[in-house]
């Protein structure tokens, strides 16, 4: 009778141990630990006055090896059952990208994380903030005017190819005036005379004639592009004066242009940082930017999408 009561107490303790293992994910008790626990239990003598089970009976004695073995087997069976349940409830999660404009989204997202979370945070952003905060405005304006003036001849050609004769004449006039009266373009005299800057790339010429954007591509170190840009960017460098500058001068021009663009984009940093999915936010904004350039700001409205938006707003009302 004594051994039976003591065995019940031991089984209750074993069940509490198993509950702790199941809740906290602790590794199962090793066999050596159980053997030590059994050896210690053999030396335990319980006084009947301290027994919560039966105060009229004294409980003293030793635990049989068969009792300990049965307790261990009960623990093993419970552990195996819990492992089986875990295997049954475990399911694999597969992420599928379905945007047809972005067929390599997995790669692009990895490059986005590298560009934005590392390069921009620790290099581009501090440099852009320093450029904006500490370089005088006339110096920044003069540098940007000089760099963009070099693109006016290619703009003249690209507007001509689109049949935009007015804008072609505008580009030619701007280059002539700013290169002379404007000190090689440092001062935008043409803008003061009513000739606003509007620069077109050969990429826009292709878009004007119906060439699609193509797959989206996040280039390491450089940022977002569409395939149409990558395939045509070299064409604009065929015209004077870009055709006369060296590779290093071209890289310097590219760096100054993008430094100014990054400094201008400082005010939009919060929009990207607070977006639910910054990658998708930037991608959608970039495609809209491409359409804006191709259509000179007059982007055609998708009637189907407009109707869906109206229906959605009506449901909200």
Image (tube, rainbow, N blue to C red):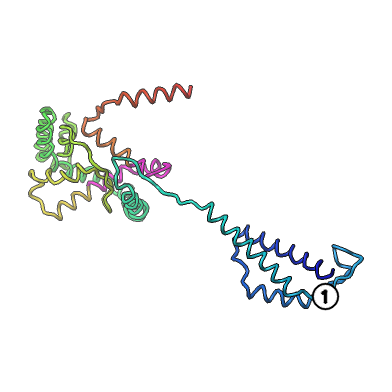
**Most extreme residue toward the front, as rendered?**
66
Dominant secondary structure of the residues highlighted in magenta in the image: helix
- Residue 152, percent across and down? 13, 39
In the image, taking residue 26 as reference, residue 240 lies left or right, namely left
Question: The N terminus is located in which quarter?
Answer: bottom right
> Is 263 in the magenta?
yes
Q: Nearer the viewer, residue 79 or 293?
A: 79
In the image, taking residue 298 as reference, residue 173 lies left or right, namely left
Instruction: Say which residue appears at 20% left-offset and 49% top-offset.
Output: 254
Instruction: Say which residue appears at 63% left-offset and 65% top-offset.
Output: 76
- Residue 77, percent across and down? 63, 62
Residue 35 vertical position relative to residue 25 in the rendered view, above or below = below
Residue 180, quarter of picture: top left
Could you tell me if residue 54 is visible in this image?
yes
Could you tell me if residue 125 is visible in this image?
no
Instruction: Say which residue appears at 15% left-offset and 51% top-offset.
Output: 250
Q: Residues within 10 Å of mark 1 (few under 14, many from 20)?
A: some
> Is 314 in the magenta?
no
Helix, strand or loop at disc 1?
A: loop
Task: Please report the bounds of the magenta region as a residue range.
Answer: 257-282
Residue 70, quarter of picture: bottom right
Identify the residue position indicated by label 1 in the image: 61
- Residue 249, percent across and down? 14, 53
**Most extreme residue toward the right, as rendered?**
56
Q: Nearer the viewer, residue 283 or 244?
A: 283
């Amino acid at each position: 009778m004594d051994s039976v009561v003591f065995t019940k107490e031991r089984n209750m303790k074993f069940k509490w141990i198993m509950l702790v293992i199941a809740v906290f994910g602790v590794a199962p008790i090793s066999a050596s630990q159980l053997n030590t626990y059994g050896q210690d239990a053999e030396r335990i003598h319980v006084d009947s006055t301290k027994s919560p089970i039966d105060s009229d009976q004294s409980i003293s004695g030793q635990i049989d090896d068969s009792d300990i073995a049965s307790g261990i087997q009960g623990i093993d069976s419970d552990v195996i059952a819990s492992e089986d349940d875990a295997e049954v409830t475990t399911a694999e999660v597969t992420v599928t990208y379905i945007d047809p404009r972005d067929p390599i989204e997995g790669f692009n997202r990895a490059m986005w994380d590298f560009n934005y979370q590392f390069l921009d945070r620790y290099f581009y952003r501090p440099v852009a903030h320093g450029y904006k905060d500490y370089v005088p405005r006339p110096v920044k304006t003069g540098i940007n005017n000089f760099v963009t003036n070099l693109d006016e001849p290619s703009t003249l050609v690209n507007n001509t190819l689109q049949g935009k004769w007015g804008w072609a004449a505008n580009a030619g006039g701007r280059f002539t005036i700013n290169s002379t009266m404007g000190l090689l373009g440092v001062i935008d005299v043409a803008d003061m005379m009513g000739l606003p800057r509007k620069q077109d790339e050969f990429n826009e010429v292709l878009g004007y004639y119906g060439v699609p954007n193509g797959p989206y591509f996040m280039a390491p170190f450089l940022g977002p592009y569409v395939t149409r840009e990558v395939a045509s960017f070299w064409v604009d460098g065929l015209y004077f004066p870009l055709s006369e500058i060296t590779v290093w001068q071209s890289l310097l021009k590219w760096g100054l242009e993008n430094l100014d663009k990054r400094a201008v984009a400082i005010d939009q940093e919060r929009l990207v940082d607070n977006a639910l999915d910054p990658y998708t936010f930037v991608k959608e904004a970039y495609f809209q930017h491409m359409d804006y350039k191709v259509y000179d700001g007059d982007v055609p409205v998708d009637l189907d999408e407009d109707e869906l938006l109206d229906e959605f707003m009506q449901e909200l009302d």
